[in-house]
Image (cartoon, rainbow, N blue to C red):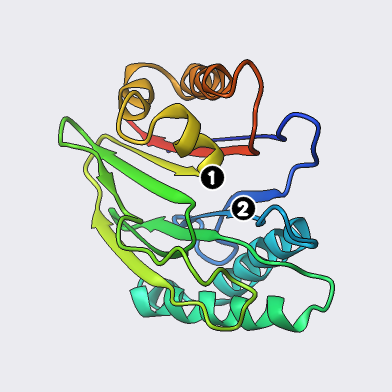
Amino acid sequence: MKAASHSFSKHGGANEDALRTCTHAREPSMFLAFLADGLGGRPGGAHAANIAVETGMALAGAATSAQVGRPEFWTEMLTTIDMEIQRAEVAGYTTLVAMCVAGGAVVGASVGDSDALLIVGLKPPVWLTGAQKKEPALGFGAARPVAFRAILGNSWTLALMSDGVTKFAGKERPLPEILLGQDSENAAQELLNEAKLRGGGQLVDDFSLIILRNE
């Protein structure tokens, strides 16, 4: 499996997104991915996004493979993160997509409007986050995380995206076609160009993307 991460700030602003990928410290066959988009227009969005990713990584890293493989583990994790952010006085609010790839499956949970897209072989793309609750975001203390789980084949692509990607690079088209049509680096560059084109030549929102591939 190959992983690639990309994050760019909107024109004239600081990047309020946070993202991380790594193998599980205790289970090298397990791969973790987290992407958070701090809510703009309010103070503390970047801090909330960083708390979400760092807390999530710590909780997943301390868990066993059996625990991490349960969808309930991820919804409980996001609820814990929600309360952790609420307790941090200078933190704002954030989305979060969190997942683990292991044993031929992907399992995780999400809150907000960041997304995760799965493409397995020649099957139609599946939005793993299609049932997620956009509001309330993490940090309000009332988030309603929604779990997801899917079986992976021998050849698959997973993409975690902030709404700066999906809103401006086309959630239905051309985004899946771009991801399938080329390697991760070129796909990320084309999506970035598409987002800039739709934004009048510049990014109007932070653009963050994680691409995981197994070919």
Near-viewer residue (25 or 157): 157
Residue 162, label in figure: 1
Q: Earlier in the sequence, mark 2 or mark 1?
A: 2
Outermost residue toward the right? Answer: 90
3D distance between C-alphas at marks 2 and 1: 6 Å
Q: In this view, does 148 lie above or below 209?
A: below
**Residue closest to the eye, 25 or 204:** 204
User: How many numbered markers are drawn?
Assistant: 2
The reply to whether dot 2 and dot 1 touch (C-beta < 8 Å) is: yes
Dot 1: within a 10 Å radius of its alpha carbon, few (fewer than 14), some, or many (20 or more) residues? Answer: many
Question: Which residue is at the front of the view, 104 or 75?
Answer: 75
157 sits left or right of 79 in the view: left
Residue found 63% across the figure and 15% down from its top: 201
Tell me the tag on residue 39.
Answer: none
Residue 182 lies, in percent from the top left, at 39, 16
- Using the image, determine if residue 167 lies above or below residue 200: below
- SS at mark 1 in the image: loop
Q: Is residue 129 above or below residue 166?
A: below
Q: Which of 200 and 130 is in front in this view?
A: 200
- Residue at left offset 81%, top offset 31%: 12
Residue 137 location (% of width, % of height): 56, 68
Name the amino acid, label 2.
Asp
Which residue is disc 2 drawn over?
A: 37
Would you identify the image quadrant in which residue 181 lies?
Answer: top left
Residue 127 to residue 58: above or below: above
Q: Which residue lies furthest to the left in this view?
A: 123
Q: Which residue is drawn at 25% across and 57% down?
A: 150
State which quarter of the image contains the C terminus. top left
How far across and down, in percent of the image, does residue 40 sit? Answer: 69, 52
Name the quarter where the N terminus is drawn.
top left
* Residue 193: percent from left, percent from top: 55, 17
- Identify which amino acid the numbered label 1 is placed on: Ser
